[in-house]
C-alpha cells in the first residue's frame, strides 16, 4: 500500500487524482491532518473508491504514526504533508519546525522500524526554495549548496538533510524531489496565482510585493506529479531530482497575464511592502531527471494558465467554501466525530 501524506492539499490531491487515472488498482492510504490547507473536498470525485482510504492524523505524532505502520501494510510513501506558505512561516515559524522537520523524522523512523532490508521506498517532496536566491543568471542544480532564506525553506532544507542522513547512515530507501512553483487546480488561495484570480474577479486590489520583478519558474502541478511518479517508480535511492519547467516569469508578468485573461484593469495592481528575506529569482536545471528518467514537462504555460484561470472561474463554489471555511464541514459529514 502507498501512503500519501498531505493528500488533501494542493499537490497531494492532484497526485492522488493522477494515480487514480494511471494506477486504478493501487491501494492508497491518504494521511492528512486537515489543517487550514487540507481540503477533503479536493478528492470528492473519488468518493466510494474502495482502494483509497483516508485517515486524519498528525505526522509529527509518533505514537499515532507508529500505530499506523503497525496496522497498515505500507510499503511506499510519497511525503507531501507540510506547512507550505512562506508568509505564514514569517508570522509563526514554530509549526513549520514541528510539521516539516519533526513530522518528516517521525515518518522516516516509523518506516525504518517497520521495513526490512531491501524493502520500501520513501519519496520526500521538497522545493527549489531550499537553494535560496539566484542572481540574474544561472540555474539550481542538484549539487547547488542549500541556502534557504525563510523559516519555511529552512524547514524543508532540514527535512531534506535528515532524509539524506537516513540514506547514508541506515541505508534507508529514500529519494528526494525538489520542484519549482506549481500552479493548477485546488491551490489554496493564499498563494500568488489563485489569490490574484480570486481578488481580480472581485475587483479587489492586487498586492504585489516590492517591485514585482521577483522571478519564479512556474510548472503545472500535473507535470510535477508525473515527475514524482517517475521518481517513485525509477528514481535512484539517495539521489535528489530537480523538477522545473524552464518557465521563468516575473510576478508582475503573471499578474498582468491574469488581468488580461479576465478582462480586468491594471489599475487593480497595488505595490505593497516587500516580503522580508524575499528571494529574487528561482530557476531549475532539470537535466538529471530528464536524462535519467525520461521525464519532461508537457503542459505549455499559456495553455496551462488559461485552463487554470478557467478552473477557478468554473468552480466558484469550491473557492467560496474555502474562503468561508465551509469546506471543513465536509469532514464531519463524511466521517462524523472520528
Ligand atoms: P498545501 O499547503 O496545499 O498542502 C499541505 C497538506 O499537508 C495539507 O493537506 C495539510 O492539511 C497537510 N498537513 C500539514 N501539516 C500536517 C501534519 N502535521 N500532519 C499531516 N498532514 C499535514 O501544500 P502543497 O502546495 O500541496 O505542497 C505539498 C508539498 O510540496 C509540500 O511539502 C511543499 O513543501 C512541496 N512543494 C510545494 C510547491 C508549491 O509550489 N506549492 C513546490 C515545491 C514543493
Ligand atoms: P507564493 O505563491 O507565496 O510562492 P513562493 O513564495 O513560495 O514563491 O509567491 C509567489 C511570488 O509572488 C513570490 O515572489 C511572492 C509574490 N507574492 C506577491 O507579490 N503578492 C502576494 O500577495 C503573494 C501571496 C505573493
Image: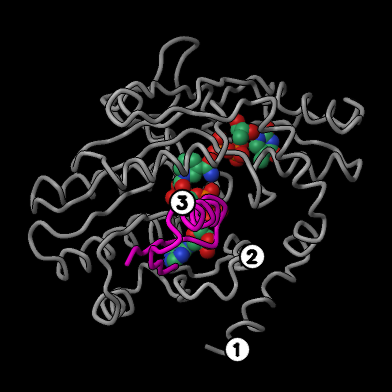
Mark number for residue 22? 3
Q: Few, some or many C-alpha atoms within 10 Å of disc 1 (few <14, some 14-19, many ≥20)?
A: few
Mark number for residue 143? none
Residue with the most extreme front position:
25
| Residue at the image point whose x is 38% and y is 37% from the top | 178
Query: Label 1's element?
Result: loop
Query: Label 2's element?
Result: helix
Magenta residues, start to end: 1-30
Mark number for residue 45? 2
Looking at the picture, does residue 180 appear above or below residue 25? above
Taking the magenta stretch, the answer to whether it contains residue 25 is yes
Q: From the viewer's perspective, is the residue at label 3 or at label 1 nearer?
A: 3
Taking the magenta stretch, the answer to whether it contains residue 227 is no
- Rendering quarter of residue 309: top right
**Disc 3 and disc 1 in contact, CB within 8 angstroms:** no
Image coordinates of residue 35 in percent, x first then y, are: 55, 66
Choose the circle earlier in sequence order: 3 or 2.
3
Choose the circle earlier in sequence order: 3 or 1.
3
* Marks 3/2: CA–CA distance: 16 Å
Q: From the viewer's perspective, is the residue at label 3 or at label 2 nearer?
A: 3
Mark number for residue 336? 1
Looking at the picture, does residue 286 appear above or below residue 101? above
- Rendering quarter of residue 66: bottom left
Residue with the most extreme bottom position:
337
Compare residues 273 and 213 and report the one nearer the observer: 213
Report the side of 99 relative to 247 (left or right): left
Image coordinates of residue 278 in percent, x first then y, are: 55, 30
Looking at the picture, does residue 183 appear above or below residue 40? above
Report the side of 319 relative to 156 (left or right): right
Amino acid at each position: 500500500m502507498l501512503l500519501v501524506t498531505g493528500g488533501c492539499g494542493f499537490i497531494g490531491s492532484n497526485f492522488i487524482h493522477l494515480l487514480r487515472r494511471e494506477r486504478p488498482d493501487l491501494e492508497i492510504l491518504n494521511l492528512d491532518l486537515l489543517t487550514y490547507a487540507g481540503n477533503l473536498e479536493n478528492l470528492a470525485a473519488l468518493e466510494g473508491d474502495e482502494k483509497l482510504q483516508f485517515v486524519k492524523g498528525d505526522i509529527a505524532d509518533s505514537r499515532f504514526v507508529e500505530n499506523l505502520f503497525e496496522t497498515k501494510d505500507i510499503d511506499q510513501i510519497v511525503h507531501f504533508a507540510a506547512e507550505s506558505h512562506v508568509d505564514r512561516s514569517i508570522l509563526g515559524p514554530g509549526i513549520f519546525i514541528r510539521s516539516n522537520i519533526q513530522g518528516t523524522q517521525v515518518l522516516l523512523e516509523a518506516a525504518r522500524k517497520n521495513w526490512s532490508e531491501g524493502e520500501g521506498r520513501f519519496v520526500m517532496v521538497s522545493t527549489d526554495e531550499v537553494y535560496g536566491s539566484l542572481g540574474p543568471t544561472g540555474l539550481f542544480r542538484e549539487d547547488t549548496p542549500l541556502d534557504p532564506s525563510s523559516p519555511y525553506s529552512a524547514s524543508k532544507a532540514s527535512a531534506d538533510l535528515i532524509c539524506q542522513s537516513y540514506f547514508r547512515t541506515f541505508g534507508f530507501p529514500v529519494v528526494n524531489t525538489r520542484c519549482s512553483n506549481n500552479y493548477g487546480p485546488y491551490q489554496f488561495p493564499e498563494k500568488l496565482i489563485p489569490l490574484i484570480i480570486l481578488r481580480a474577479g472581485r475587483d479587489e486590489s492586487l498586492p504585489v510585493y516590492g517591485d514585482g520583478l521577483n522571478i519564479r519558474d512556474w510548472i503545472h502541478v500535473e507535470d510535477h506529479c508525473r515527475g514524482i511518479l517517475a521518481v517513485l517508480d525509477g528514481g535512484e535511492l539517495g539521489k535528489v531530482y530537480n523538477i522545473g519547467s524552464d518557465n521563468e516569469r516575473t510576478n508582475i508578468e503573471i499578474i498582468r497575464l491574469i488581468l488580461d485573461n479576465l478582462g480586468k484593469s491594471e489599475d487593480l495592481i497595488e505595490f505593497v511592502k516587500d516580503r522580508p528575506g524575499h528571494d529574487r529569482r528561482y530557476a531549475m536545471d532539470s537535466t538529471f531527471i530528464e536524462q535519467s528518467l525520461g521525464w519532461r514537462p508537457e503542459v505549455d504555460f499559456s495553455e496551462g494558465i488559461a485552463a487554470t484561470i478557467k478552473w477557478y472561474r468554473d468552480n466558484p463554489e469550491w473557492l467560496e467554501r474555502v474562503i468561508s471555511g465551509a469546506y471543513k464541514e465536509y469532514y464531519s459529514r463524511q466521517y462524523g466525530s472520528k
